[in-house]
Image (cartoon, grey):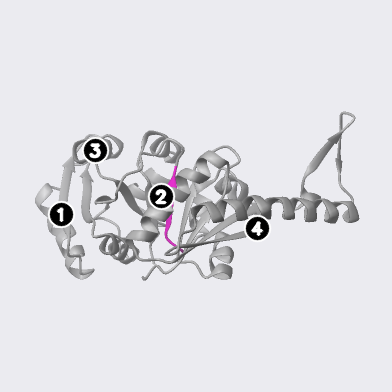
Amino acid sequence: MSITKILVTSETASMSTKVMGFAIHIATRLHIDEIVLLHILTPTPSQAYMTTGEVYMAPGVQAAQIDQERLETQRKKLQAEAERFSTPQLRITPKVDFGDNRTRLNSYMQKYGTDLVIAEGREERGFIENLFGNDTERMIAQTDYPMIIIKEDSEISDVRKIAVAIDVNEERHGGLESIRDFAAGLGATMHLVHVITDENTNADDAIEKMRELAQHYHFTNHALHAVNSSTLEYGLHSFIQKYNPDMIAVLTQGKGKLTRFFYGSATDDILKESDKPIFVSKIV
């Protein structure tokens, strides 16, 4: 997969600056010359307005007028932000669009010809929540493109080491190509890690399976790690603390314990506790 254009979601000024700064760093490293800066507005008819203590829905004509005013206001703000970040080598293209929680992220990626989305995650009423609510698993299921999720407290640094969480017992690992190509473009080392939580798998077997994966997907700059731990969560956190990667990468839409850990009931915990950007690639 070749990344030629990045989609960045625009939120609050402080968070947008952090996300945009990271996106510019990635674009520079990957020799990308355009970033699309996108802000999504919820159409007025689906919004409730308060007046004299009562909730009412704006009528059609009034809603259209309100939407046009909101659109122009946001366009001016986004244009100013785009001009602030643009350079002769990197063009920031501002886009304002209407959407709601039924709008799939894929449609915006296709509309603007982007290959990678960088978005803030787990912020109340942020871009992800506006599109998909609080159901991260559903959001991931509806997205076919690689995504980098950054929290407000994410530790941003030059991406040289990427921890790739691997479940060697999964049947499919097709999304590894996206992670491989992304890492190769950055010149980063992929640290494949499998956490052993039972007695049926030993470290040598896990390493051998990861070695086979590395050969199959033509990995070059990589290292293999097998971690014994009582729980998957503790094993991953211990690995991250020891090796201090700059980013965590994970495959989605599998059926194994790793997918359930990241995108099941423990999703909130891993996103809250991890201070690293998270690269999400869908299994194909």
Going by the numbered disc 2, the residue's amino acid type is Phe
In 3D space, how far apart are the residues under numbered discs 1 and 3 (Cα atoms)? Answer: 17 Å
Q: Residue at x 46, y 43 (%)?
A: 18
Going by the numbered disc 1, the residue's amino acid type is Ala
Query: The residue tagged with tag 1: helix, strand or loop?
Result: strand
First of labels 2, 4 by sequence position: 2
Relative height, residue 31 to residue 23 (above, below): below
Would residue 100 be seen by someone viewing this image from the given angle?
no
Going by the numbered disc 3, the residue's amino acid type is Gly
Q: Which residues are magenta?
A: 145-150
Q: Quadrant of residue 97?
A: bottom right
Which residue does the numbered mark 3 point to in the structure image? 235
First of labels 1, 2 by sequence position: 2
First of labels 4, 1 by sequence position: 4
Label 1 crowd (10 A; few <14 / some 14-19 / many >=20): some
Q: Is 65 on the left-hand or right-hand side of 18?
A: right
First of labels 4, 3 by sequence position: 4
Which residue does the numbered mark 1 point to in the structure image? 223
- Image coordinates of residue 123 in percent, x first then y, are 53, 38
Q: Are marks 2 and 3 in contact (CB under 8 Å)?
A: no
